[in-house]
Amino acid sequence: MSELVKVLPVAEEPEETLSMNPKKFIVWMFVVSIVMLFAAMTSAYLVRRAEGNWLEFKMPAIFMYSTVVLLISSFSMHWAYRAAKKDDFGTLRTAISITFAFGLAFLVMQFIGWKDLVAQNVYFVGNPSGSFMYVFTGLHAFHLVSGLIVLLYALRASFQLKIHAKNLTQLEVCMTYWHFLDILWVYLFGFLLYFN
């Protein structure tokens, strides 16, 4: 005698969708667009340099020091993140403030570097090598100012206790953008140092 086996429909588990926090997605899209912008500009630099009539000049030494300052700011930004994960609000505020101060110091050093370029008779208008130098450093400085604004929002949120171990999104967005700006500057500095 055969038993009838009743087959029950197997409940299919829904496929896991890939998702990302919208704020993180926006910052990554912004990062990609900036990478594309600077990739296009460095390509244009190489093409124009190969055509000749290129002014050779000494890279301002302060740009090397400003690179170190920006790298230190990355460490303080990571320190802020670690403090937030531990709900150490005092350290979080201190670390964000230090990052902000180093960012401002970097901008001041860039301005001093531009003054050094002027002292070498390298101007925005004139030879394309100078124009590229000012455009590269100026665009990066502009993006760094936007990073400082993002840092101020994170600092305000830290005082309002909106950044803590269970809510790190705002700080992660800030940290991603800040580290990217640091990496971008290291790339630009190395590129300009090598190809100048």
Image (cartoon, rainbow, N blue to C red):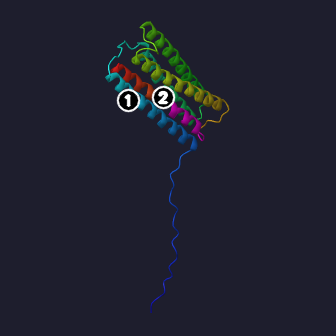
Identify residue type, mark 2: Leu
Q: Which residue is mark 1?
A: 43
Q: What's the CA distance linking mark 1 and mark 2? A: 19 Å
In which quadrant is the N terminus drawn?
A: bottom left
Q: Is residue 38 rendered to the left or right of residue 100?
A: left
**Residue 137 at x, y percent in the picture:** 46, 21
**Residue 77 at x, y percent in the picture:** 52, 28
Q: How many marks?
A: 2
Q: Is residue 69 rendered to the left or right of residue 96?
A: left
Name the image quarter holding residue 130: top left
Q: Which residue is mark 2?
A: 181
Kind of element beneath mark 1 = helix
Name the image quarter holding residue 90: top right
Kind of element beneath mark 2 = helix
Identify residue type, mark 1: Ser
- The residue that appears at 48% across and 27% down in the rendered structure is 74
Q: Earlier in the sequence, mark 1 or mark 2?
A: 1
In this view, which residue lies farthest toward the right? 160
Q: Which residues are magenta?
A: 165-178
Question: Would residue 118 be counted in the magenta stretch?
Answer: no
In which quadrant is the C terminus drawn?
A: top left
- The residue that appears at 52% across and 18% down in the rendered structure is 107
- The residue that appears at 57% across and 44% down in the rendered structure is 22
Which of the two marks, 1 or 2, is nearer to us in this view?
A: 1
Is most of the magenta stretch helix, strand or loop?
A: helix
